[in-house]
Amino acid sequence: MPSEPSTPHDVAAGLAANGYLADEGLVTAVFLALSLHRPLFLEGEAGVGKTELAKTIARWQGTELIRLQCYEGIDAAQAVYDWDYSRQLLHLRAAEASGEARGKDTAELEGQLYDERFLLKRALLRAIDHKNATPPVLLIDEIDRADDEFEAYLLEVLSDFQITVPEVGTFTATNPPIVILTSNRTRDVHDALKRRCLYHWVEHPGFEREVNIVKLRVPQASETLARQVAGAVEALRGINLYKPPGVAETIDWATALGRLGVTEINEQVVEQTLGTVLKYREDQTRVRDHGIAGVVQHAFERGLLHG
Amino acid sequence: MTFTVESDAEHLAVGFARVLRQLDIPTPLDSVLTFINALALVGIDNRDSVYWSARATLVRRPEDIAGFNKAFAVFWEHKESPYAPDEEELHITLAVDTEEEGAEGGTAEISNEPSLTLRFSGVETLRDKDFADYTDDEMRQAQHFMESLRLASALRPALRMTPTRSRGRQPDMRATVRASLAAGGEPMRRRWTTKSDRPRRIVFLLDVSGSMEPYARALLRFVHAGVAGRQRVEAFTLGTRLTRVTRELSSKDPDRALRATGDQVHDWSGGTRLGETLRQFNDEWGVRGMARGAIVVILSDGWDRGDPEVLAEQMQRLQRVSFRTVWVNPLKVTPGYAPLARGMAAALPYVDKFVEGHSLDALEQLTKVINHA
């Protein structure tokens, strides 16, 4: 539905229809971001579905997703624009060969070179300079990995939604993109940038919501299995792990179990598939020391509540 | 939206912002305006809508959520006061040489001797003096010396390219195209770029437990000089808990920075749980990215009341992600010292450089170690 939602409920329905079950806090934040045309800043543990949210919004709004993956040392040439040098050189050679270059001064030739058609638009510029009726979703992923200078530049872009290319001119967004920023919080992002945005700390989902997520994303898993997997993950999160499993891991696990034809989990199956949920050797050891039986028992109790 | 609702919302929003500010949650005016706009959209009838709108517009750090919840309960739901007595934090102020102290202590001595000579010869004689024997006045003199120590840290190759005069590996297309204009499109003069270097991040972890007391004050000044003097330096204190003090220490004014740090660190001169706090650092910051490829400097005497196995495991994790792990132990020079402290013994196998840190000379050495790590 490419129209603006009029209540938070519309957002919840729209996201759910596209396979994303959000809690009320996230729904409200998304609704406000869309209505107030503010960027949405999402922080939270890895694997709670921050990136997935941006993808889902794009699908729901029927628009393009423009993703900018941040990393240390990212600069304007990779995030904003660059020039297509090989084509520029070709153009110069062609002008020379056809005799067109003769009689023209360097300034004129240079003017031809730094024309929009030789401009390679990267994510930020593409998001600003789109021509569609529905604005694209601009996902600025893991902003905490970029450098301070890039953050400062981003602040400027997100305030005015315009980008200046000195040789060409200023691009201004007539219809600003929907901006989602994510951070894993490896360092604090500058306050000024956060102040431009609406903020939401994404939590691991509660038990019932996680069951529903599994049922939605892994339709081949039975109700019992979905409840048991969610229960087992809940138990794992209760143990002091380095990397408690996120929703992504829960879905992976349920998919793996479904693929193995498992209908009910037991100790042996958990032992065999632990690698889909826990990615640190220390965490696996800790769970084994803690006792897989305990995890399975918790999963069973959770599974039974239903039936 | 009727007029009354809107003005109600405005009053409520502004009032709520004031409560938040009293709880030290930064609430700038533009956030409050956004909150008012949000209330105009969701209305003020539904508790959950108001709550989540306020969270999205007014809170920007997960640490503030607990305080926010309390304020919300009081303001919107008229629940109990947020200033419950058990929440009163015990303030232990870090021993900082304040202006007043300086004036008092200084005048007495300076009346006898010319201050200039005192300061000059002071630093000279101080160089190998143990920090534990420092007076407040000497500490202040040492400050200047510490500020003169320049932390550079080893370089790592950056992603960015810089132009180079000599023939490099990567052609600089931008410059080549520009140069070829003069030759009618013939790239006669080729330009080159080379990989540039960036300094590695430095992370200081300063033990502020009771046993480190004689040294922590001086070492904090050293850490401050590092944080304030360069970009990409992070600082934490370790004690019974982990406290990030980078923000507090980034003020150029040492007195202000140290005072702010003192206000922030609540476990000053308390016990030590090195392993546990290191685990917290690894979980929340280090392994996630801050310590990756960084030079991690731990300043501690290695006394740990926790399980040495926990410390060993956490050190191993830290060493696996960091570029270099440096352990600074002020007790290392003590005659007959052997790393017998259980914690120190457990950590040593995972330390790349083990250095002393009891005097200015030792810190100068440490600076060299960091710069050439």
Image (cartoon, rainbow, N blue to C red):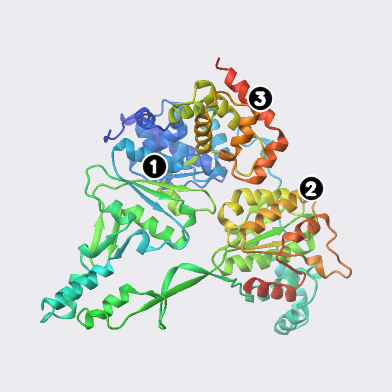
Residue B36, picture quadrant: top left
Q: Which residue is the extreme one toward the right?
A: B336
| Residue sitting nearer the eye, B270 or A150 | A150
Name the spot of residue B310 as percent of width and height, x first: 74, 48
| Residue sitting nearer the eye, B331 or B256 | B331
Question: Distance of mark 2 from mark 1, alpha carbons?
Answer: 43 Å
Question: Distance of mark 3 from mark 2, alpha carbons?
Answer: 30 Å
Residue bearing mark 3? A297
Please report, as a chain letter, where disc 3 is located: A
Please report, as a chain letter, where disc 2 is located: B
Please report, as a chain letter, where disc 1 is located: A
Q: Is residue A66 above or below residue B118?
A: above
Q: Earlier in the sequence, mark 3 or mark 1?
A: 1
Q: Can residue B266 be seen from the camera position used here?
A: no
Q: Amino acid at mark 3?
A: Gln
| Label 2: which secondary element | loop
In the rendered view, does B338 fall on the left or right side of B143?
right
| Label 3: which secondary element | helix
Between circles 3 and 1, the one closer to the viewer is: 3
Residue A285, picture quadrant: top right
| Residue sitting nearer the eye, A280 or A29 | A280
Residue under the image location 75 percent in, 57 percent down: B347
Residue bearing mark 2? B307
Q: Is residue B244 above or below residue A49?
A: below
Tag 3–tag 1 contact (CB < 8 Å): no
Are dots 3 and 2 on a single chain?
A: no
Residue under the image location 53 percent in, 39 percent down: B19
- Work out which quarter of the rendered image holds the N terminus of chain A and state it: top left
Name the spot of residue A63 as percent of width and height, x first: 29, 41
* Numbered label attached to residue A54: 1
Q: Amino acid at mark 1?
A: Ala
